[in-house]
Amino acid sequence: MDYLMTLGIFASIYTILAISLNILTGYAGQVSLGHAALFGVGAYTSAALTVNLGFNYWAALPLSILITALVGALIGLSSLRAHSDFLVLITIGINFVVVALLKYTPFFGGPYGLLGIPRPSLFGEAMNTFEYFWYAVGWASFTILFVYWMSKKYIRTAFEAIKEDEEAAEAMTVSVPRFKIYAFAISAAFAGLAGNLWAHYMGVIFPGNFSFDTSIEIMTMIVLGGIGTIRGAVFGAVLLVFLPEYLRFVSDYRMLIYGLIIVFTMLFIPSGLLGDNSITWRWTRIFKKGDRVAKNNEN
């Protein structure tokens, strides 16, 4: 049972990560291949605050989210002077820079990482796996609800306008620089939350946990599930957490498989498995419409 709970915790964390990247790439059209860097900033910030500086977990939680959001906003500033391919290269570079800083900075434990990261406590007792599962699921649910709420607001419209055509967005009085920074900051905040949850569940973190490989995994989740949709991000995250457990015999080729998934999906099913224009989603809507028609005829 603990094994399934652990997979559920990982699925919840990666759901938050996938949705956070989806805000940036799926909604605002800012492609990032260095999202694991923000994941790492959140994890190491919270871990360093609790292990090295003696902070209580509940004080470290908002600080880790805030600091990661600020780092995301700073990256967003760089996006104002770079577009498309250049932004992708910048985010890749940032990922390598962050990993190097973590690896060669003694305060962050260097290559040996940080050990002894405490679990959150409830009534003076550290959370067990069952409690942490519901804690992670709660945060994943909050993330889904927040992004659903955001999708009904003007900010989502502004993001999509920037994604489609920045010049046209400016002509429609959308402040492109401001909303780009918003996209990076909001995306980073949720990545920082995911990092916090990861660090305090694992109890130990290493720079390699947040490498470029992890960025590719996160991107694969939203590409496979369906970029620009909440359901696609959730589906891709859950699928790519549980599926490898049944494909351990090819674990050495994991990154090759992820690369092939991205290439195949972009070439043949660019909307992903559950994207708005995907065959799967269109058929689902057709079946639902057919059921409604049948019920109306019966009545």
Image (tube, rainbow, N blue to C red):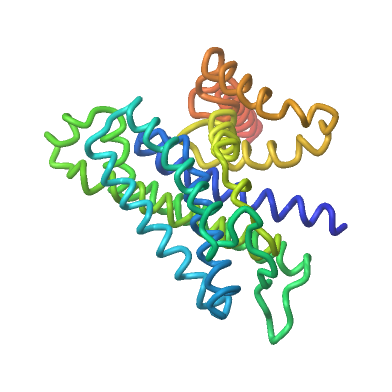
Asked if residue 229 shows in the view, the reply is: yes
Q: Position of residue 246 (x, y in %)?
A: 83, 34
Picture coordinates of residue 228, whole percent (x, y): 45, 35
Residue 293 in view: no
User: Which is more toward the observer, 14 or 57?
Assistant: 57
Residue 60 in the image, given as x and y percentages of width and height = 51, 73
Q: From this viewpoint, which residue is outermost toward the bottom? A: 124
Identify the image quadrant of residue 258: top right
Name the image quarter holding the C terminus: top right
Compared across the picture, whether 211 is left or right of 129 comes to left
- Give the answer, above or below, for where 80 lies relative to 267: below
Quadrant containing the N terminus is bottom right
Residue 196 location (% of width, % of height): 57, 62
* Vertical arrangement, residue 149 with respect to residue 270, above or below: below
Q: Is residue 90 left or right of residue 197?
A: left
> From this viewpoint, which residue is outermost toward the top?
268
Residue at point 54%, 29% (across, down):
223
Nearest the eye: 226 or 121 = 121
Nearer to the camera, 277 or 76: 76
Q: Farthest residue toward the right?
A: 1
Residue in front for this viewpoint, 289 or 55:
55
Write the residue at 22% across / 49% down. 178
Is 134 placed above or below 270 here? Answer: below
Q: Is residue 93 left or right of residue 244?
A: left
